[in-house]
Image (cartoon, coloured by chain):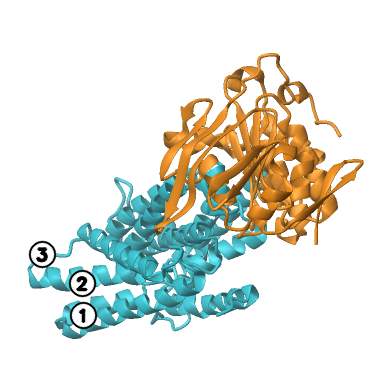
Chain colours: A cyan, B orange
Amino acid sequence: MNGRNGYGRLILALVGAMLVVLAASIRFGAIDFSVADILAAFSSLLPGHAEATLNQRIFLELRLPRAVLCMLVGASLGVGGTLMQALFRNPIVEPGLVGTSSGAAFGSALFFVVGGAFNIGASLYSLPIAACLGGTVATYLVFLLARSREDGRASIVMLLLTGLAVNALFMSAIGFLSYIARDPQARSITFWSLGTLAGASWTAVQIVSISTIGGTSIALFYAKQLNALMIGEEEATYLGVNVNRLKWIVLSINVLVVAVATAFTGVISFVGLIVPHILRMMRGADNRFLILGSALTGATLLSLADLLARLVLRPAELPIGIVTSAVGVPVFLYLLRKRRYVF
Amino acid sequence: MSFPGGNASVNQRRSAHVLTIVLTADNISFRVAGRELISGISAVFEPGKLHLVIGPNGAGKSTLIKVLSRLIRPSSGRVGYEGENVTSASELDLARRRAVLSQAVEVAFPLKVREVVMMGRYPHFGGRPGPADETIVDEMMEYFDIIEFSDRGYQTLSGGERQRVNFARVLAQLWRTDHIETLPKCRYLFLDEPLTFLDIRHQIEFMKKVREFGSASDVVTVGVVHDLNLAARFADQIVLINDGRVVASGTSAEVLTAERINAVFGIIPTFVKAESGVHLIFD
């Protein structure tokens, strides 16, 4: 029986794994920090201690916020994937596939360029709002176009194909923006389509932590209703779920967590696909476990990917999207073949 | 066959004070995309009796069940549960007293049998199931003889086994734990062609269990079945519909006449008397 204790132990194990990866992620990179370096860096923050050295400042202002932001973004993508899969009752849906991520990236890029032209500085606070708008528009567009004319439902094949088309559209729009933009802007625009954590800052951590923790907490509240949805929309209604309201709430949470994360890191695909899949293989499909578990596992996996991206070509680094795609695409193809979708 | 557990008295209540008319359909119509699926249906359904709706394909049977169970709201007319118009009732309020057994339930992810049955208790608890919910689920699984599947994946079961799981889930949803909590309100059980994928033995077993549960004085049961013989054998009341309208209603002897069956289904039956009652044979 899947009692509270069964989940509790697994959740603790996932927290443990996350902390181990966090430790590795703050130690290793372009420069390695020893445990003593790290402790010294932390103690320099305490009052009455010596001013931080350059090395310590690199740790505190670059390495540490990057590691924390990576966890938050990974958690957001994991939760987003779980929510989308539960909502569409399909294990191959993820935020990157239904337009949310590319729309958010486009929203950020457009805001950057247009804001620059009108001398509206793209502040760290207005950027996530632009990303949310872009993510909402793209997600809505995908579902609008994928809906069949007969019964108003989106078939999974239509959803994937429409997502592909809308993603391509928004990606080429980002390409266009980077082409017309003046040089310093252009560099920051291309990063949204590749995905990187190099721009991490404590401000970004602050903003993303609000959306991630807030979104995950609200999602947990709807876990039971999402469970009921697993046996079908009609059956969920019979079990007391207002399915339309649930759809809107869950889609909104997804857009919020994914778009805000994308605003600071660009498009990182496939995390939202793999994470719920791994957890379902470990411990069933109960969303009460999956939502929290996918936040923790998403954080762990994206940190691992980021660590890899920083170490493979050290001291240079790979865009993290390359790492997640290299792992994610085979999983996606496997799932696609296993379910035998007939086109 | 008997009901499990100590709650039998609550769930099999046959009180002297019986509400005669509980579920009412008052001139209900449902239109979609310019087509009228049911037109001006009026009917009353009494507690403790088994009402079965029959009619040819496309007659509007499933639509009628969906409107009565408030999955969809009628375009016009009124559905009353104990006189209360259910149009504005909340999903959760309805789920605590109304359950629907559907034709087939597909799950999207690997769920264990027990998890599916426990979903029947979802309307009754907030975060986690209480001890009473666990007990009810255990008893229902025992009653439907699926306790040995408890930890098996729902997706690995056969059609007949799945329907037993769903029936256990639906009765768990309507099961009462105490008198006071829900006494004034009746419970409503709807069946939307649940026998379609079952073999004949399971069909009979199902109908017996439906009749047993539905005989409680606070349970209103309305179902759709395809097999006229099954309807004739188990129904207390039959509602025959065609083209979205009620053609006739009453006992099977009243409704199932040769002329009427020929008029509605376009086939002439032969009536054969057997020990279990009158049977219809079609050539």
- The residues bearing labels 3 and 2 have C-alpha atoms spaced at a distance of 12 Å
Kindly identify the residue that appears in the image at 82 percent across and 46 percent down.
B204
- Front-most of B232 and B70? B232
Amino acid on which the number 2 mark rests in the picture: Leu
Residue at the disc numbered 3: A120
The N terminus of chain A sits in image quarter: top right
Instruction: Provide the chain ID for the residue under circle 3.
Output: A
B148 horizontally vs A140: left or right: right
A64 horizontally vs B107: left or right: left
The C terminus of chain A sits in image quarter: bottom right
Give the mark, 3 or 2, whose residue is nearer the N terminus: 2
Local packing at callout 2 (Cα closer than 10 Å; few below 14, some 14-19, many 20+) is many
Dot 1 falls on a residue whose secondary structure is helix
Amino acid on which the number 1 mark rests in the picture: Leu
x and y percent of residue A182 in the render? Answer: 14, 82
Q: Nearer the viewer, mark 3 or mark 2?
A: 2
Amino acid on which the number 3 mark rests in the picture: Ile
x and y percent of residue A203 in the render? Answer: 27, 57
Residue at the disc numbered 1: A177
Kindly identify the residue that appears in the image at 7 percent across and 69 percent down.
A118
Q: Nearer the viewer, mark 3 or mark 1?
A: 1
Residue at the disc numbered 2: A110
Instruction: Provide the chain ID for the residue under circle 2.
Output: A
- Front-most of A178 and B175? B175
Give the mark, 1 or 2, whose residue is nearer the N terminus: 2
Determine whether A91 is above or below B201 in the image.
below
Dot 3 falls on a residue whose secondary structure is loop
Q: Is residue A198 visible?
A: no
- The residues bearing labels 1 and 2 have C-alpha atoms spaced at a distance of 7 Å
Determine whether A96 is above or below B11 in the image.
below
Instruction: Provide the chain ID for the residue under circle 1.
Output: A
